[in-house]
Structures are given as C-alpha cells and as structure tokens.
Image: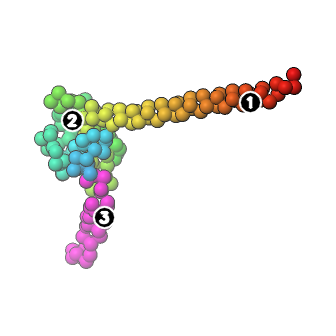
Amino acid sequence: MVFAYGIPIYRDNQIIGALTATKTIALFMDAGAGKGILGGDTYAYITDSNGSFLMNSQYDIFGQDHVLTQPFFKEGELENTKEKLANYEDVSFSFEYEGNRYYAMLKPLGVNDWYILCVNMLTESSLFVDRNIRVVRMLFLGVILLVMGLLVYGYYMIRKSNKNYNRQHIWIL
C-alpha cells in the first residue's frame, strides 16, 4: 500500500501549488491486518507524537484511545518514554493486560511525527523462536548424522583396502 500526503504552497495568501510525497507502507499494513510481523499475531496501531491513536488494528483488544496510559505504561515509565518519543527513538516495552503478558515496540514512521505501535503476546513471540530453534536443531542433527555416516564409510573403505593389500602381498613372505 502507498501512503500519500501533501501540503499546500502559498504565495501572497493564495495557494499556487502543492508539495506531495508518497511512502510505501506494506509492512505496516500487514501488521494492521493482524499478520504476524513479530512472530505471531500482531496488533498494530499508528499514533501521533502525543500518543493518541490515529489508526487501530482491526483486531483491537485493548480498547484504548491513547498509548501513554495504563495498561501500556506505569507512571514511572512515562517520562522516559515521552523523552524518547521527543527524540524520535524506538521504544520497546512490555506490559500485562487481562492476565496476558505483551511485548510492544513504538517506532517512528518519519511522517508527521507519527509512530507505529506493534503489540504481540510474549507467548506468541517465543513460539516464533521455538520454531527457529527446532529447525536449527534438526539441521544440526542432520549434519552430525552425515559426518558420522561418512566416518563409518571411510573406516569401512580403509579396512577393505587393507584386506586387499594383505591378500596381494601375503605370497612375498
């Protein structure tokens, strides 16, 4: 999806043109559709620099209008988060909501001081890691079995070669 925005250009209080720009936001739209970009089902929001939600995920489960409130942040964390947002820095945090633990990330979009907020359940995130670990484990096991098989085959070939050598040279003695 392409996001387009523009501003009018004025001369003597009259609009004489417009400056426009576009940005491809396919990743953000995947997140907004609930597709897993953090390894599981992701809830994505676009917020302004004050933390107000501009766009909610279609699977909004929090029912909040503002990110800089409970359940997302505790009182002691707000000042540090506001400072990072003012400096256009990424903010990663975790919180608990209705008995579930969530991992979240606020990342600047580079447009109008907007941020994307991606929220994922911690259990879903670890499932992504578990799948990767399982694949690596299977590949490692396959490599070990291959090496062991080659060692056994090499041993068999050397032993066979030694028997043939001994048979050919036994008449010399």
In the visual, does 170 lie left or right of 124? right
Q: Residue furthest left?
A: 63
How far apart marks 3 and 1 lie (CA) works out to 76 Å
| Residue behind mark 3 | 22
Q: Nearer the viewer, residue 98 or 79?
A: 98
Give above or below for 76 relative to 104: above
Which badge, 2 or 1, comes first in the chain's sequence?
Answer: 2
Q: Specify the amino acid type for callout 3.
A: Thr
Range of the magenta residues? 1-29
| Residue behind mark 2 | 72
Alpha-carbon neighbours of circle 1 within 10 Å: few (<14), some, or many (≥20)?
few
Q: Residue at x 14, y 40 (%)?
A: 61
| Residue behind mark 1 | 164
Q: Residue at x 31, y 40 (%)?
A: 39
Q: Nearer the viewer, residue 151 or 95?
A: 151
- Magenta run includes residue 41: no
Q: Which element type, helix, strand or loop, lies under badge 2?
A: loop
Which circle, 3 or 1, is nearer the viewer?
1
Q: Specify the amino acid type for callout 1.
A: Asn
| Displayed quadrant of residue 36 | top left
